[in-house]
Image (tube, rainbow, N blue to C red):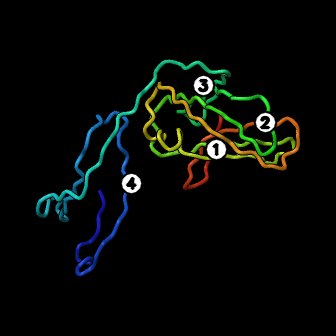
């Protein structure tokens, strides 16, 4: 629900943009998007008007642990598990790509969309490769994760061309893009 004083809007065009969460359990189909003007008394003023259509597509959910090369069992915040990961190759040349798949296992609903960060970090702490994204190339925002499911989340991380040979670490996590706040690892 969004409020706007109508007396202030007389003769004006009011433009607004609103983000609404669609519950992960919403059945897939086309939905009408409508607006209704409501007076100070909470009663509708006139009829609802359809302003568009929204297609909700169902998401395949896997409740079985996937086969993964490395088990991790880390918890981020109080609701997200990182069950493990796969690394496509053990060594990469400078300017190459690290191919990484993360396996998330949420334990509760998330009320905000979080981004994943993936960093390739050298012994000096310098980041030589990075990829940040909404999980699954934007296709599985954290607000749609269902408790108990497993989400495969693939990243191709480009490395700097001038990276020195050596051993590097991969750091991953979740953060709120609006605030920069990271979920703590527990």
The answer to whether mark 3 and mark 4 are in CB contact below 8 A is no
Q: Earlier in the sequence, mark 2 or mark 3?
A: 3
Going by the image, does 61 lie left or right of 11? Answer: right
Q: Which residue is mark 3?
A: 83
Q: Earlier in the sequence, mark 2 or mark 1?
A: 2
The location of residue 173, given as percent across then percent down, is 64, 40
Q: CA distance from mark 3 to mark 4?
A: 30 Å
Q: Which mark is residue 91?
A: none
Circle 2 SS class: loop
Q: Badge 1: few (under 14), some or many (20 or more) residues near its Cα, within 10 Å?
A: some
Q: Earlier in the sequence, mark 4 or mark 2?
A: 4
The location of residue 99, given as percent across then percent down, is 67, 35
Q: CA distance from mark 2 to mark 3?
A: 24 Å
Q: Which mark is residue 19?
A: 4
The answer to whether mark 2 and mark 3 are in CB contact below 8 A is no
Q: Earlier in the sequence, mark 1 or mark 4?
A: 4
Q: Which residue is mark 2?
A: 92
Q: Earlier in the sequence, mark 1 or mark 3?
A: 3
The answer to whether mark 2 and mark 1 are in CB contact below 8 A is no
């Amino acid at each position: 629900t969004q409020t706007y004083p109508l007396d202030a809007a007389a003769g004006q065009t009011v433009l607004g943009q609103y983000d609404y969460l669609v519950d992960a359990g919403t059945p897939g189909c086309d939905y009408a998007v409508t607006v209704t003007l409501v007076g100070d008394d909470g009663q509708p003023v006139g009829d609802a008007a359809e302003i568009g259509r929204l297609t909700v597509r169902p998401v395949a959910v896997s409740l079985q642990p996937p086969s993964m090369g490395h088990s991790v069992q880390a918890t981020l915040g109080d609701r997200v598990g990182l069950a493990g990961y796969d690394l496509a190759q053990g060594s990469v040349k400078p300017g190459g790509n690290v191919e990484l798949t993360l396996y998330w296992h949420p334990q509760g609903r998330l009320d905000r969309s979080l981004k994943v960060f993936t960093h390739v970090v050298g012994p000096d702490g310098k980041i030589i490769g990075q990829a940040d994204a909404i999980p699954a190339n934007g296709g599985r925002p954290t607000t749609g994760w269902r408790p108990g499911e497993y989400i495969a989340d693939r990243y191709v991380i480009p490395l700097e061309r001038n990276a020195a040979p050596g051993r590097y670490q991969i750091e991953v996590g979740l953060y709120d893009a609006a605030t920069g706040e990271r979920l703590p690892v527990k």
